[in-house]
Image (spheres, grey):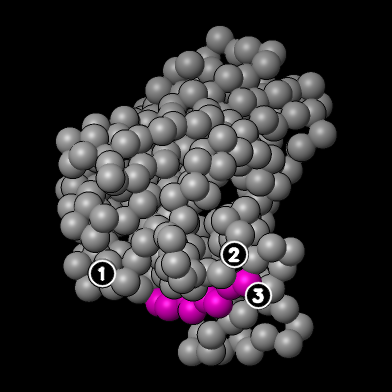
Amino acid sequence: MSTAEAFDADWLALRGPFDAAARDGSSRLVARLRTLRPGQGPWRVMDLGCGTGANWRWLAPRLGGEQHWLALDHDAALLRAWPLPADAASSLDAPLRWRGRGFDATLLRREAELARGLPSLPWAAVQLVTASALLDLAGADWLGDLVRHASEARATLFFALNVDGGHTWSPADADDAWIGGLFAAHQGRDKGLGPALGARAVPWLAQALRARGYRVALGRSDWRVGPGDQAMTTAMIEGFARAAIEQEPTQAPRVRAWRARRLRAIDSSRLRVGHLDLLAWPAR
């Protein structure tokens, strides 16, 4: 996803294979989602913070059938960076048509400010609201507005790849948990959607939706980064270290020492990053 915090296309491309592998663990949720398909007509889907379209490319073939998508992001550069079929028009004003095995989808890409723009979205025309890597960046007020608009529209929700706060390194380092704590605190900063709930976002949203009469199912979609994934391992080490120093500048020497040890061990390192997927639908 993309909010006021910058996510460049290179990072989205780097994480793409790990996202796709992790999401295979949510096949049970997708199977349940398919049973919620509207009785007649196409799926009408709204993708929030769509970035370069990874969520759409993964989910559309698995939904199957006819689909109409509205893909929204505040960053027009990411919308223009979508990989498109050779015969597709590159203009954001032009609808895209994808046909694949078992599905036929029409899609519109639109620039939209999600921070304050939720009330202006076409909720009445939407049956499924989806996003990838979004919830942990959002604050309680924004998520509360999302719940209100979605529940009034009786829309189904499917949110993938939301961090749950778990980071397990192997082999372990004595400062892994300390660095993880600083990273978690840093995640609570405002990313453009209010002070972020981070790892608390999925439980918060699940409770709020149940209070609105929704049924909620959760699934795991953990990243597994291994010794052969040095580019991702390096990016994660650098990201943890950068966030930890921003959170606690006085501890920069200790953070840099952790970073150096982790980089020296990169050929044998494994990292598991915990993620949760959430599927919610109105009780009939």
135 sits to left or right of 231: left
Q: Position of residue 90 (x, y in %)?
A: 61, 86
Q: Secondary structure at mark 2?
A: strand
Q: Earlier in the sequence, mark 2 or mark 1?
A: 2
Three-letter code, disc 3: Trp
Three-letter code, disc 1: Ala
Which residue has dot 3 on it?
98
Is residue 106 one of those drawn in magenta?
yes
Which residue has dot 2 on it?
65
Quarter where residue 80 is shown:
bottom right
88 sits to left or right of 106: right
The image shows residue 110, relative to residue 166, as above or below, that is: below
**Counting other residues with Cα less than 10 Å from the Cα at mark 3, is it few (<14), some (14-19), or many (20 or more)?**
some
CA distance separating discs 2 and 3: 11 Å
Q: Earlier in the sequence, mark 1 or mark 3?
A: 3
Is residue 239 one of those drawn in magenta?
no
Q: Earlier in the sequence, mark 2 or mark 3?
A: 2
Which residue has dot 1 on it?
124
Report the magenta stretch's main SS: strand
208 sits to left or right of 100: left
In the image, the segment drawn in magenta is: 104-111
